[in-house]
Image (cartoon, coloured by chain):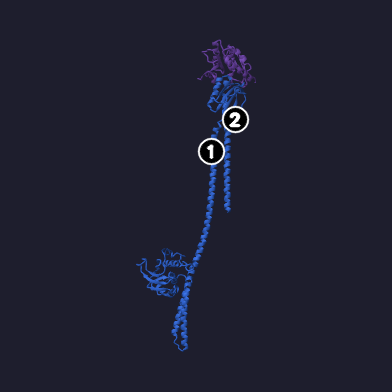
Chain colours: A blue, B purple
């Protein structure tokens, strides 16, 4: 704001400076013209005086010997100078003895008092004494026309033109300066806006990164939330098993029988299963670093059967065909997370119920991807499928087709990221109304490993 | 002052004389007589011809004619610049006679020739009027041209007499014989 006002003041000052310069130039032009005029007049007077003196010196003898013809010759010689209007030679009595007048101008006076003088009006009149040593022999009269004003004006027109051009240059320069100042102003404003926008953008980027982080976590918690209903039911069943066995054991002991190991084993089995379930939920919900291990994905998925069943609801039939027996190097928790996400997506795509197929296959290098051996995990549903557009954007972060509050748009995105990190590939095969098949290819782990578990 | 008055008078005289030269020979002679001292400012004598800047100009006349008759009256009390003008009538002409201008008149042509030759080579302006002198050459000779008094100038003779004639005077001459 202050800057703008300063610029405005500067621009006004620029205007004033330009105007002042123009006025100064014009004044200077007028002065130069007047000076030129004065100079011209002085020069003319000087020239006339010199010519008069030359004439005076030339005609002395003619005057002394009263030779009018000789005097006239000298006077006539002045005709060569076109500026000479009239000339005359006078004796001591002031009588003209020779004279010359140019056509259309006034002739030299018939009589002239012997005084030296200079007159300037439209022309220059000079009278000079004719001297022989110190004796005055007479007077010469010389009238020279000043250049016509029109002709002088033409000469001064050059000065005027120069001044006009200088003034024009001053105004053009000042105009250009103003335009430049305005452009500069606009540019400064734009730069300021741009800087502001940049700061805002960086703010937004930071906020978005934070939100992404938060969403990633909440996405996991959402999955847990979805799970918790089913898990609670499962947990209840386990408790029922334990409780039933304990009650049976109690009754047997009350009957005096000691053979209760069967019930203890059954209860322990229930406890173990409950502990295992708890362990897995904890592992899932905690932020654990990636710890890739060589494992059998088929075994991993087999152990997830209960978890999956609880996540997808009862109207969805789960079928598992776990044919792969190759090992792959991956983080068990993350892999579970991936499959769980895909299963939940599949069940969401089948609100009316349907069939969920989870299959694993060995994919030797000669098959789909020529680069190496892969273990393929296929999650396939009979749901509503995806349009081409949705399919294209399926792995974009925050892209979701689920109603607000249900999906984060991060499930497939995170799956894709994880698979790529692990050197694998992800493939979506879907058409509207024909269900969706998602294939994940994880590189095969060649070294034989003993640990096969999650 | 006196000089300027005299000049005015003379100018009047001269202007009248122009028209009356034929009718009144005495006026013509008066003009010629006046010319004798009027030549002086246009002639440059060698250094030493005059003692000082105010030394008089000596105009000498030899023989007798209309000019010698009136010269005394015409030149009387005239001045050339700061110099007074004296007129001397000579009966014999010798070298180193103190004359600056020598007017040689008739009627004896042989005597005139002798007089002129006797001052040849000395700084004297020699003037004659209408004399036929086959054996002598004066520096200035009066002639009549279109009823006006004019003159011829012999530059060679002037050079012989170590005199320099101003170009202004030369420009008025009817005829100029150049230097050799």
The image quadrant where one finds the N terminus of chain A is: bottom right
Q: Are marks 2 and 1 in contact (CB under 8 Å)?
A: no
Residue under pointer 1: A161
In what quadrant of the picture does the C terminus of chain A appear?
bottom left
B52 above or below A259? above
Whether residue B95 can be seen here: no
Most extreme residue toward the top, as rendered? B108
- Residue that protrudes farthest toward the right in the picture: B1
Provide residue A374's location: percent of width, then percent of height.
38, 69
- Name the foreground residue: B20 vs A286: A286
Name the residue beneath numbered marker 2: A121
Q: Is residue A281 above or below residue B166?
A: below
The chain under label 2 reads A
Which quadrant of the structure image shows residue A448? Answer: bottom left
Q: Looking at this view, is B177 or A404 the one in front?
A: A404
Q: Is residue A294 above or below residue A52?
A: below
Q: How many marks?
A: 2
> Circle 1 sits in a helix, a strand or a loop, which is it?
helix
On the picture, is A19 further left or further right than A392?
right
Of A176 and A248, nearer the camera is A248
Residue A353, position in %: x, y?
Answer: 42, 72
The reply, left or right, for residue B21 in relation to residue A410 is: right
Q: Residue at x 54, y 48 (%)?
A: A178
Could you tell which of marks 2 and 1 lies nearer the N-terminus?
Answer: 2
Q: Which image quarter: residue B9? A: top right
Q: Is residue A388 left or right of residue A173?
A: left
């Amino acid at each position: 704001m202050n800057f703008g006002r300063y610029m405005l003041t500067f621009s006004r000052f620029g205007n004033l400076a330009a105007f002042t310069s123009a006025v100064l130039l014009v004044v200077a032009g007028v002065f130069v013209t007047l000076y030129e005029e004065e100079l011209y007049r002085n020069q003319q007077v000087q020239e006339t005086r010199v010519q008069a003196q030359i004439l005076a010196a030339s005609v002395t003898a003619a005057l002394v010997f009263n030779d009018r013809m000789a005097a006239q010759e000298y006077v006539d010689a002045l005709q060569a100078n076109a500026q000479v209007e009239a000339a005359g030679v006078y004796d001591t009595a002031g009588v003209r003895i020779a004279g010359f007048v140019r056509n259309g101008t006034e002739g030299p006076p018939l009589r002239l008092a012997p005084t030296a003088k200079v007159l300037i009006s439209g022309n220059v009149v000079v009278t000079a004494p004719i001297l022989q040593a110190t004796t005055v022999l007479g007077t010469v009269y010389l009238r020279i026309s000043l250049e016509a004003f029109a002709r002088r004006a033409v000469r001064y027109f050059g000065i005027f033109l120069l001044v006009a051009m200088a003034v024009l240059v001053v105004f053009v320069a000042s105009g250009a300066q103003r335009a430049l100042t305005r452009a500069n102003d606009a540019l400064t404003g734009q730069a300021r806006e741009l800087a502001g926008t940049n700061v805002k953008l960086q703010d937004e980027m930071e906020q978005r990164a934070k939100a992404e982080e938060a969403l990633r976590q909440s996405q996991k918690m959402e999955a847990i939330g979805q799970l918790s209903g089913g898990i609670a039911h499962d947990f209840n069943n386990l408790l029922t098993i334990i409780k039933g066995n304990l009650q049976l054991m109690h009754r047997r002991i009350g009957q005096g029988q000691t053979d209760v190991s069967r019930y203890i084993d059954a209860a322990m089995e229930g406890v173990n299963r409950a502990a295992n379930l708890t362990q897995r939920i904890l592992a899932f919900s905690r932020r654990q670093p990636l710890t890739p291990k060589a494992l059998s994905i088929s075994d991993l998925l087999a152990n997830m059967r209960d978890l999956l069943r609880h996540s997808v609801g009862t109207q969805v039939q789960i079928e598992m065909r776990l044919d792969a027996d190759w090992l792959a190097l991956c983080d068990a928790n993350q892999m579970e997370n991936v499959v769980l996400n895909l299963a939940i997506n599949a069940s969401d795509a089948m609100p009316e119920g349907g069939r969920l197929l989870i299959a694993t296959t060995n994919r030797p290098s000669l098959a789909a991807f020529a680069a190496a051996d892969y273990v393929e995990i296929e999650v396939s549903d009979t749901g509503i499928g995806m349009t081409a557009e949705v399919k294209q954007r399926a792995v974009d972060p925050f892209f979701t087709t689920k109603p607000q509050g249900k999906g984060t748009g991060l499930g497939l995105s995170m799956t894709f990221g994880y698979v790529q990190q692990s050197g694998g590939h992800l493939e979506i095969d879907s058409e509207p109304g024909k269900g969706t098949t998602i294939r994940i290819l994880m590189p095969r782990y060649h070294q034989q490993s003993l640990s096969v578990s999650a | 002052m006196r000089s300027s008055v005299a000049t005015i008078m003379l100018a009047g005289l001269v202007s009248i004389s122009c028209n009356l030269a034929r009718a009144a020979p005495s006026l013509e002679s008066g003009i010629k007589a006046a010319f004798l001292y009027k030549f002086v400012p246009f002639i440059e004598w060698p250094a030493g011809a005059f003692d000082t800047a105010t030394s008089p100009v000596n105009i000498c006349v030899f023989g007798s004619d209309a000019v010698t008759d009136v010269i005394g009256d015409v030149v009387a009390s005239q001045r050339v610049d700061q110099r007074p003008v004296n007129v001397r009538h000579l009966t014999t002409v010798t070298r180193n006679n103190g004359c600056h201008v020598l007017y040689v008149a008739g009627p004896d042509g042989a005597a005139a020739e002798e007089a002129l030759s006797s001052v040849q080579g000395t700084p004297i302006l020699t003037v004659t009027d209408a004399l036929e002198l086959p054996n002598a050459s004066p520096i200035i000779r009066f002639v009549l041209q279109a009823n006006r008094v004019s003159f011829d100038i012999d530059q060679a003779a002037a050079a012989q007499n170590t005199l320099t004639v101003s170009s202004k005077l030369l420009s008025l001459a009817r005829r100029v014989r150049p230097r050799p």
